[in-house]
């Protein structure tokens, strides 16, 4: 196409096309990621960082395309990309790893905000999911930040349970062990008695099951159902304490 004021019109059209595509991609990703952040209950700051990151990626891609159309030799583009990539790799390798891991967690969604989870040895309520870290409130009222890269290498247990009434319940499981002095029938009575005290304040009656029995110990798994995850912090030690108090009473009777 003929030059206009010394500028090739083909170049102008290509530049306009690149700009139009970049703007369309930016708007599409912004709308989608904003909705995605709301759907997964992501913190506003984390959602903004996610949108900003993809805007930067689109901008860099557009600049590379414009540089190529504008006549910059491919060797220069490769050289600048290699130098920039090496510098970025040495300076922020861990950050990039956390970022990629964060994107994977947001896509896979093994847990959400306010879920009660166990990540490795850390147990508690998920308070925030960012691009780099996940924050968990533990039973000791401590806020633990776990890098998303570490989360991918740990076992994850999510205690969320979907009930038949379309209400999100949390089925928390913990173990209680006893020796063989008190009879199994009496231990069953203890569990039922303790559970009866709390059944009116819970969405579903707690249950228990014998998980293993050895020469000196029997271990029971207790299933505690709650609607609000923070209730686990108070109910777990309370129920365990009541069970052990009743067990101590029965144990004392047997030893008399």
Image (tube, rainbow, N blue to C red):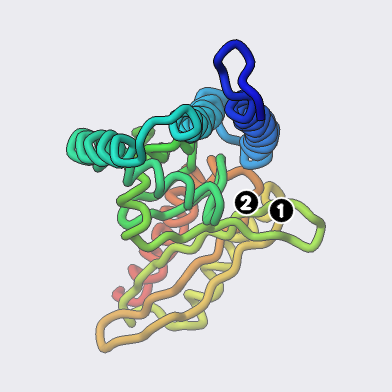
179 relative to 125, above or below:
below
Q: Which residue is mark 2?
A: 226
Q: Quadrant of the C terminus?
A: bottom left
Pinpoint residue 200: horizontal percent, then vertical percent.
71, 50
Residue extending farthest front: 2
- Taking the spot 20% from the left edge, 34% from the top edge, the residue there is 87
Marking on residue 203: 1
Q: Secondary structure at mark 2?
A: strand
- Is residue 34 among the parts visible in the rendering? no
- Taking the spot 28% from the left edge, 34% from the top edge, the residue there is 80
In the image, 244: left or right of 35? left
Q: Secondary structure at mark 1?
A: loop
Q: Are marks 2 and 1 in contact (CB under 8 Å)?
A: yes
Residue extending farthest top: 5
Q: Quadrant of the N terminus?
A: top right
- Taking the spot 48% from the left edge, 38% from the top edge, the residue there is 129
In the image, 44: left or right of 139? right
Pinpoint residue 62: horizontal percent, then vertical percent.
52, 31
Disc 2 residue crowd, few under 14, some 14–19, many 20+, Cα 10 Å:
many
- Image quadrant in which you'd find residue 32: top right
């Amino acid at each position: 196409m003929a030059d206009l004021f010394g500028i090739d019109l083909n170049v102008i059209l290509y530049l306009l096309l690149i700009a139009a595509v970049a703007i369309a991609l930016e708007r599409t990703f912004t709308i989608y990621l904003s909705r995605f952040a709301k759907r997964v209950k992501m913190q506003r700051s984390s959602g903004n960082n996610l949108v900003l990151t993809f805007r930067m990626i689109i901008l860099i891609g557009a600049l590379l395309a414009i540089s190529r159309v504008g006549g910059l030799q491919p060797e220069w583009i490769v050289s600048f990309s290699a130098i920039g990539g090496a510098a970025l790799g040495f300076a922020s390798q861990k950050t990039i790893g956390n970022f990629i891991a964060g994107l994977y967690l947001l896509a896979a969604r093994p847990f959400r905000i306010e879920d009660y989870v166990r990540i490795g040895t850390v147990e508690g309520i998920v308070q925030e999911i960012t691009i780099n870290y996940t924050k968990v409130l533990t039973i000791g009222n401590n806020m633990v930040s776990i890098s998303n890269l570490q989360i991918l290498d740990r076992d994850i247990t999510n205690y969320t349970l979907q009930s038949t009434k379309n209400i999100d319940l949390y089925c928390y499981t913990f173990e209680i062990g006893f020796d063989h002095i008190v009879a199994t029938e009496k231990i069953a009575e203890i569990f039922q008695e303790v559970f009866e005290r709390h059944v009116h304040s819970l969405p579903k009656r707690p249950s228990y099951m014998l998980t293993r029995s050895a020469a000196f110990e029997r271990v029971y798994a207790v299933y505690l159902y709650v609607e609000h995850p923070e209730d686990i912090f108070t109910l777990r030690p309370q129920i365990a304490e009541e069970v052990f108090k009743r067990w101590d009473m029965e144990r004392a009777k047997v030893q008399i």
